[in-house]
Amino acid sequence: MSWMPSNDPVLGDKRSCDALELIIVPRVRDLGDGFAVRRALPHGRRQMVGPFIFFDQMGPVQFVTGQGLDVRPHPHIGLATVTYLFDGRVMHRDSEGNALEIVPGAMNLMTAGRGIAHSERTPGHARAAGQKMFGIQSWIALPETHEETDPSFQHFDAADLPVVEDGGVWARVIAGSAFGRTAPVGMLSPWLYAEVRLAAGASAPLDPNPEERAIYVVEGEVEIAGEAFEGPRLLVFRPGDRITVKATRPARLMFLGGAPLEGPRYIWWNFVSSRRERIEQAKEDWKTGRFAPVPGETEFIPLPEA
């Protein structure tokens, strides 16, 4: 999903740490009602890390009683969305008939393929009580051979995902393999995704095997090769180097990466494709109502004019 259509560049810089290729400072965007996202990908100097082509931090924000998230039905093609929450709840509904509440720690992977529409809203019980919202929304670009695959949705409860604990290190493997464990989620290309929490003074290794890899510092501060980085930052590393990340104060991180795709992608609004003409077709399909509707929804987000 795109909670807002944009592929604006965000700020970036380079530092002296030899293993680092790029440091991305995500741009803060206010979506209204005090709900902000921080967008790290795509970036003007780096479109993807592995297949990760879109990376938003949602919140943290506190909704008052009666308020919440209301993302009306909107379309996607050529990608898979990952919704991962630290706090809060989101009701997901899509045009394939999937309807479930997304909760913290669960893995939720919606593969758009040839086309899907979905909505995301704060559930009624959470809206009535007022809730916090904090999490990461990311897009996984699909390989050319799978861009037109059938749409689908995978959900794994937090208890279904491998968790590793060692001293001051806690990690949940959301997708792929890390820390000697493998998540059960099915993938159309190799990629890695994990939440890592470090107590002050604790260290964790970043596997050198993914050809492209990064660490998103959600909160706290870490040290790598003697250099300190505080959140929010996306740290993109060169391939092959062994990386150890140490928390100088309690930190929450996302490890991400994977094999690069065959080439860059076109991005327009909520559409991703290796072919520009496929984007144009998707625009026309949404404009003329050829996407399947989302059951139970009567609203939708119109095609942007620009």
Image (cartoon, rainbow, N blue to C red):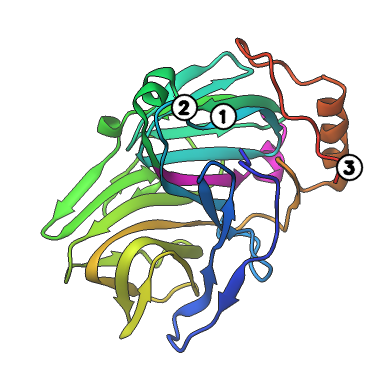
Callout 2, which amino acid? Thr
Earlier residue among tags 1 and 3: 1
Which disc is residue 122 wearing? 2
Of the 4 image quadrants, the one containing the N terminus is top right
| Residue 100 can be seen in this image | yes
Q: Kindly state the secondary structure of the residue where label 3 is placed.
A: helix
Q: Is residue 179 left or right of residue 89?
A: left
- The circle drawn on residue 277 is 3
Q: Answer above or below: position of 188 versus 296.
A: below
Contact check, label 1 and label 3, Cβ < 8 Å: no
Type of amino acid under label 1: Asp
Q: CA distance from mark 1 to mark 3?
A: 31 Å
- The x, y position of residue 187, in whole percent, is 51, 39
Q: Position of residue 34 (x, y in %)?
A: 50, 46
Mark 3 or 2: in front is 2
Q: Tell me the magenta residue range.
A: 134-149
